[in-house]
Image (spheres, grey):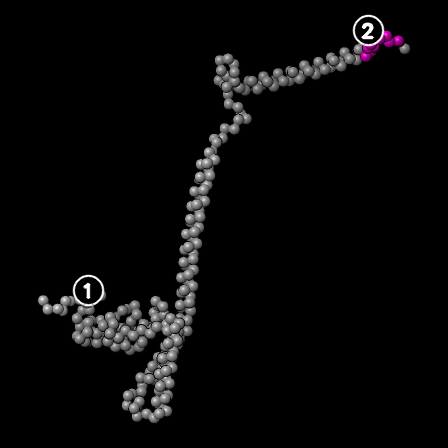
Amino acid sequence: MADETNTPDGMSPSARERLRKAADELLKADRKANRRAAAGNADDYAELDPNEFDDEGNWIGEDPDMDTTPQIDPVEALTAENADLKDRMLRLAADMENLRNRTKREVADAKSFAVANFARDMLAVSDNLRRAIEAVTEEKRDSGSDEFKSLLEGVELTEKSMLGTMERHGVKKLDPEGQKFDPNFHQAMFEVPNPEVPNNTVVQVVQSGYQIGERVLRPAMVGVAKGGPKAPPADAPAEDQSDS
């Protein structure tokens, strides 16, 4: 085996050779990297628009990484959002108020008309009590025994109590005699020639009517006057009866 003599710098020839080879490999790798970078830059440069450079060769084009989205003023955005929320709240408040009023009306109607069917059935009982009372003439009242008078008084009290109970529950008896005929509450059965009262005046009640709240439970069956003077308007001023 040959003796390796160290060089003046203390490195053997074989070590120096290995160092030289390593340096050559590094130089080759660096040249390859530079060539790849140059090729990539050339491709990128070829894709650029010449109009994006000024006369001195400085690039003035738009940066593709730059955010081109128009900026929104945060104050304007908050103002618009606040106006939208306010409009929604006003609409919601209006809807809730309408719902509250509608529910209130429905509850009131339910309370007023819950007994309508029952009250309508009880009208037949009231009619029978009234017929029993009207069947007794004044002569029979006067000539009847004490027991008979007590029985008749009990029937009258029963009718009065029944009508009072129905009225407490919103059922009101219609007594239109002497009033102007109203087709909403009255049903005309016949006409009575009577020039002493205004035309279309109720002069006789054949069957009493009833109403519950503002609704008609049963219209009153009536006879109306015919041939009399016209009834004056409700808002007409009264004639001056004083001497001129």
User: Residue 43, percent across and down?
Assistant: 58, 19
Q: Are marks 1 and 2 in contact (CB under 8 Å)?
A: no
Please report the bounds of the magenta region as a residue range: 2-15
Q: Is residue 133 above or below residue 186?
A: below
Residues packed near mark 1 inside 10 Å, few (<14), some (14 to 19) or many (20 plus): few
User: Residue 218, percent across and down?
Assistant: 34, 72
Left or right position of 117 against 176: right
Q: Is residue 166 left or right of residue 63?
A: left
Q: If the image is split into quadrants, where does the N terminus sit?
A: top right
Q: Is residue 187 magenta?
A: no
State left or right for residue 178 relative to residue 93: left
Residue at label 2?
Answer: 8
Splitting the image into 4 quarters, where does residue 172 fall? bottom left
* Dominant secondary structure, magenta: loop
Q: Amino acid at mark 2?
A: Pro
Q: How many labels sit on residues?
A: 2
Q: Which quadrant of the structure image shows residue 137?
A: bottom left
* Quadrant of the rendering where the C terminus is positioned: bottom left
Q: CA distance from mark 1 to mark 2?
A: 143 Å
Whether residue 33 is visible, yes or no, is: yes
Please name the residue shown 58% across and 17% down the image: 42
The correct choice, above or below, for 154 with respect to 83 in the image is below
Residue 3 highlighted magenta (yes or no): yes
Q: Which mark is residue 236?
A: 1
Of the numbered discs 1 and 2, the one sitting upstream in the chain is 2
Residue 24's disc is: none
Most foreground residue, 36 or 53:
53
Residue in the image at 24% along x and 76% along y: 203
Farthest-out residue, left: 244
Residue at position x 84%, y 8% from top?
6
Q: Secondary structure at mark 2?
A: loop
